[in-house]
Image: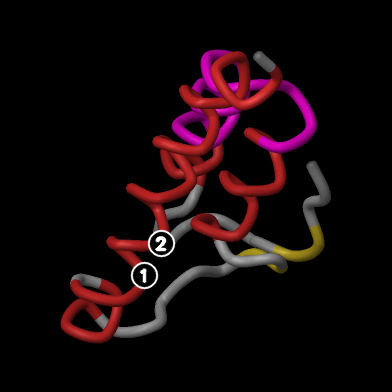
Amino acid sequence: METLRRLPSLAVIAGVRLYQIVLGPLLGGRCRFHPTCSNYAIEAVRKYGAVSGMLRGVWRILRCHPWSTGGHDPS
């Protein structure tokens, strides 16, 4: 039963990991934050669940641009 409840979070984390393995190397490491946006999204999903974690990850990605100061931004 617990696994079924965690399935959405596991699916989101698997999607982010797939991005890290397949697209990440092609796009290059340009994240201005620590941890990286993809690692932040994984931490947020683990801490807040699939929906809230994804929203926090998207908000983080929207703030990651060339004019951002970046820095340490924990979930």
Q: How many marks?
A: 2
Q: Quadrant of the N terminus?
A: top right
Q: Which residue is mark 1?
A: 20
Name the spot of residue 42 as percent of width and height, x first: 60, 48
Residue 34, disc: none
Tell me the SS state at disc 1: helix
Q: Nearer the viewer, residue 5 or 36?
A: 5
Tell me the SS state at disc 2: helix
Other residues around mark 1 within 10 Å, as few (<14) / some (14–19) / many (≥20): some
Q: Which residue is mark 2?
A: 17
Contact flag, marks 1 and 2 (Cβ < 8 Å)? yes
Q: Nearer the viewer, residue 17 or 41?
A: 17
Span of residues in magenta: 46-59
Other residues around mark 2 within 10 Å, as few (<14) / some (14–19) / many (≥20): some
Q: Residue at x 83, y 50 (%)?
A: 74
Q: Is residue 19 above or below residue 48?
A: below
Q: Amino acid at mark 2?
A: Arg
Q: Quadrant of the C terminus?
A: top right
Quadrant assignment, res 60: top right
Quadrant assignment, res 12: top left
Quadrant assignment, res 18: bottom left
Q: Nearer the viewer, residue 63 or 56?
A: 56
